[in-house]
Amino acid sequence: MGNVRAVQRAARIVTALTEHPYPLGIVELAKFVRLSPGSVHRLLATLVSVGWVEQNSRTSKYRLGMGAVGIGSVALVTNPVVHDGRAHLARVAQWSGHDAVLSTLVGGRTVQLARAAGINTDLIEFEPGHPQPAHAMADGKLLLAFLSEEELADVLGVEELRRFTPNTITDLGGMRREFDEIRARGYSVDNFERFDTGRGVAVPVVDSGGRPLAAMMCLGKLDPAQDAELVQQLQSVAREMSDRLNATGDLPSSSFEPTRFPTSDDDAPGGARSEPDPG
């Protein structure tokens, strides 16, 4: 159990460094992952030793290391969900004329894994891996909506929800009402909540247990009057993608509930609790 707990804590640190693209110090990391600075320092030493994390010699702050970069790059090339998703995104982009995106949730951010440009795109070049605030985009709200209450508390309970446009939802009560609506209708939209010039519509790509595995989103200057037709097309393509992956045995299963990062014995700064140092 101790070794499993250490892995969980290390995963929390790697996730926090993924969510925040700028280097973080130990105190900042301790706040984000709800661990004591001493625990974070010891775990970072191990992560640095295996190359997953690097430390700036001048600022002493930490960022993802080349080891993590290499693993992520290989995963983007070899992962069947991403590989198969590209062909399905191309169909959506061709049909809609707008960008089609496949994304996943990393903590409180979404990360785009693949993207196909439509004829109406404003995109010049796409690079995967840029984290976006989940609470302000259709794909992020969709994936957040299907998390458990405990997972939501871990994701949304650390930082304030930042406002990007006048329409961004920044209060937890409003966000929970939004999640209720998303679960009821099975798709998500954003009302110019991240960008003033564009909006998104997203549907889930589900795993073999029916749990959202990724989000398939159409993004651009979408006409709200065409949302219903767009949702129907997206849902059809997402179902086809899930069925194809399931038939080949490449669809992950959610038969086991994902392990929640433990926070019950935390005593972090600001009233939150952080986990005590082991031993």
Image (tube, rainbow, N blue to C red):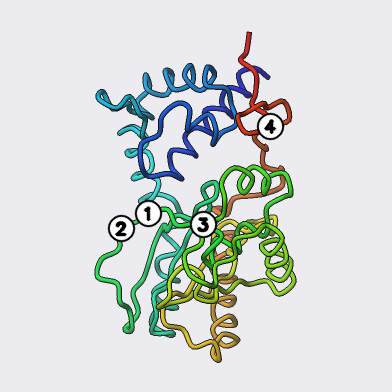
Q: Residues within 10 Å of mark 3 (few under 14, many from 20)?
A: some
202 relative to 220 in the view: left or right: right
275 relative to 112 in the view: left or right: right
**Residue at image location 64% in from the left, 49% down from the top:** 253
Residue 213 screen position, x and y as percent: 58, 56
Please report contact status of discs 3 and 1: CB closer than 8 Å, yes or no. no
Q: Which residue in the protein does label 2 denote? A: 127
207 or 181: nearer the eye? 181
Q: Looking at the rendered structure, which numbered label has been put on residue 130? A: 1
Q: Quadrant of the C terminus?
A: top right
Mark-to-mark CA distance, 4 and 3: 24 Å
**Callout 2 secondary element:** loop
73 or 127: nearer the eye? 127
Please report contact status of discs 4 and 2: CB closer than 8 Å, yes or no. no
Q: Nearer the viewer, mark 3 or mark 2?
A: 3
Q: Residues within 10 Å of mark 2 (few under 14, many from 20)?
A: few
Residue 276 screen position, x and y as percent: 65, 18
Please report contact status of discs 4 and 3: CB closer than 8 Å, yes or no. no
Q: Nearer the viewer, mark 4 or mark 2?
A: 4
Residue at the top extreme, as displayed: 279
Please report contact status of discs 3 and 2: CB closer than 8 Å, yes or no. no
Q: Which residue in the protein does label 3 denote? A: 162
Amino acid at the residue labelled 2: Glu
Nearer the N terminus, badge 3 or badge 1? 1
Please report contact status of discs 1 and 2: CB closer than 8 Å, yes or no. yes
